[in-house]
């Protein structure tokens, strides 16, 4: 898939984050073992519930921010505040990518690293200002 526009990057990031929310719900439900998350360091059911609930809330907030960014792009507007939040998300996921490289569980190491790196890239792409049609130097 050739992602060269911020809107496509935003949509793909929203889809991935929705999948992440579903994943965390499955962990809370017990259908996915909690040993494959958080480096296998969660010691009790209450810790799993706390960490997974926080993860779900943060991911839902990110989906909302990305939706707002998409809406702004469609109307040709920008918001410095939204861009700063997305920049923070990108930094947060870049750090998480490094952390996932040190995960004990193989699935967390490779799948977690892949998705956090991909989301970091998509967040950065979403911050690229759209090109204005018929602007000097923009060949179509």
Image (cartoon, rainbow, N blue to C red):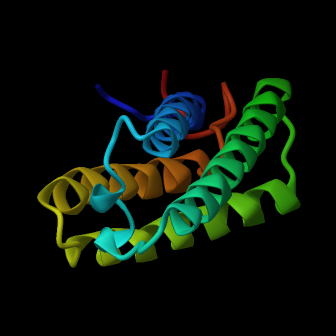
Q: Where on the picture, by quarter, is residue 49? A: bottom right
Q: Where on the picture, by quarter, is residue 30? A: top left
- With respect to residue 84, does 128 lie above or below? above
**Observer-nearest of 106 and 135:** 106
**Observer-nearest of 46 and 52:** 46
- With respect to residue 48, does 139 lie above or below? above
Figure quadrant of the N terminus:
top left
How many marks the image carries: the answer is: 0
Q: Where on the picture, by quarter, is residue 38? A: bottom left
Residue 16 shown left or right of residue 106 in the figure: right
Return the residue found at the far left: 106
What residue sits 55% from the left and 32% below the top? 18
What residue sits 67% from the left and 26% below the top? 133
**Observer-nearest of 109 and 63:** 109
Residue 88 shown left or right of residue 117 in the figure: right
Residue 89: image location, x then y, percent: 61, 63
**Observer-nearest of 18 and 140:** 18
Residue 28: image location, x then y, percent: 51, 45
Residue 20 shown left or right of residue 56 in the figure: left
């Amino acid at each position: 898939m050739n992602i060269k526009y911020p809107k496509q990057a935003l949509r793909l990031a929203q889809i991935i984050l929705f999948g992440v929310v579903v994943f965390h719900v499955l962990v809370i439900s017990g259908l996915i073992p909690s040993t494959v998350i958080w480096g296998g360091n969660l010691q009790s059911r209450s810790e799993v519930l706390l960490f997974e609930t926080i993860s779900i809330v943060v991911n839902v907030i990110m989906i909302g921010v990305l939706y707002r960014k998409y809406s702004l792009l469609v109307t040709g507007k920008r918001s410095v505040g939204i861009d700063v939040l997305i920049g923070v998300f990108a930094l947060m996921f870049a750090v998480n990518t490094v952390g996932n490289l040190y995960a004990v569980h193989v699935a967390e190491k490779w799948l977690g690293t892949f998705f956090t790196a991909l989301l970091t890239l998509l967040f950065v792409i979403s911050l690229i200002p759209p090109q204005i049609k018929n602007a000097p130097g923009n060949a179509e």
